Amino acid sequence: MKNNINTLVVCSADELKKLKDEVSQISTEVIIKYHADNYKDALRIINDVNVHLDAIIIDGTMSNENILSLLTGYDNKVLLSRTIVIDNIKLDCYNLSSTDYQLYNVIPKNYKTRDLILSLHEIKNKNEKYNLQKISIYDQVAEILKKLGIAPDKNGFHYLRKAIYECYLEPSLLTSITKDIYPMLAKSFCKKESCIERSIRSAIETGWDRGNYEYSNELFSNCVDYYKTKPTNGEFIAIIVDKIMMEQGRTSY
């Protein structure tokens, strides 16, 4: 049927049975049409030009398997935007190559099946395409954060990257970091707002102490005295958003 969501699930047989039972109680539109219990077979199905997939669900915690090898092995990169990875890391991206940033969703292992089904419907309805703008902005933000001494192995790095991206898309959010951005990040990363705020604060402070002094001073000198204080979370996000917008010739909010 037109509204069916033809899905490939990559997981163990036991996990598949559990998922099928739970999905059948909630939705008749989600059709688990294909299954693979290892990444090699999964990639064969994904790259089969005769197979139509509306969505792909991958257990990213399967033992003796390399999730990055699977994701970077897609022949059709559009399918990355239809992929949901279930993993324990609770981050919305892995450190893939620059061309593959942010094209799939990562949800925690303790997900609710109803939320998973909602995500599948969103993927089906949006029919997402390879979002080059998002990749470009995420890469640009990542490079700036690294220059400022904020490493990708810190949660604050990922929270900041998403916050900056969202504020780039909608600059009015810059005036409501606490009211809108923290709740948005808390929902995306399954964390408390206070945890999001602390992690961002910690990332900024760490970067300030060990980052590139010349670059930091150049970026923040008009707003912050490098030797006397550090930028607030909101100032930090706003200055990077403004830098990216000016570089792209987008000078009006």
Image (cartoon, rainbow, N blue to C red):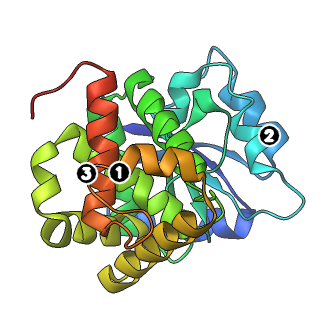
Tell me the residue at 55%/37% (across/down). 101
Taking depth in this image into account, of 218 and 201 the one nearest to the observer is 218
Could you tell which of marks 2 and 1 lies nearer the N-terminus?
Answer: 2
| Dot 1 alpha-carbon crowd within 10 angstroms: few under 14, some 14 to 19, many 20 or more | few
Disc 2 residue type (three-letter)? Ser
Q: Of all residues shown, which one is farthest toward the top?
A: 49
Residue 229 on image: x %, y %: 37, 73
Task: Name the amino acid, label 1.
Answer: Ser
What residue did someone put label 2 on?
Answer: 69
- Could you say which is closer to the camera, residue 185 or residue 252? 252
The disc label shown at residue 238, or none: 3
Q: Which residue is mark 1?
A: 221
Q: CA distance from mark 3 to mark 1?
A: 14 Å
Q: Which residue corresponds to the image point at 69% horizontal and 20% vertical from the top-left?
A: 48
| 149 lies left or right of 164 | right
Helix, strand or loop at label 2? It is helix
Dot 2: within a 10 Å radius of its alpha carbon, few (fewer than 14), some, or many (20 or more) residues? few
Where, quadrant-wise, is the N terminus in this rendering? top left
* Nearer mark to the viewer, of 2 and 3: 3
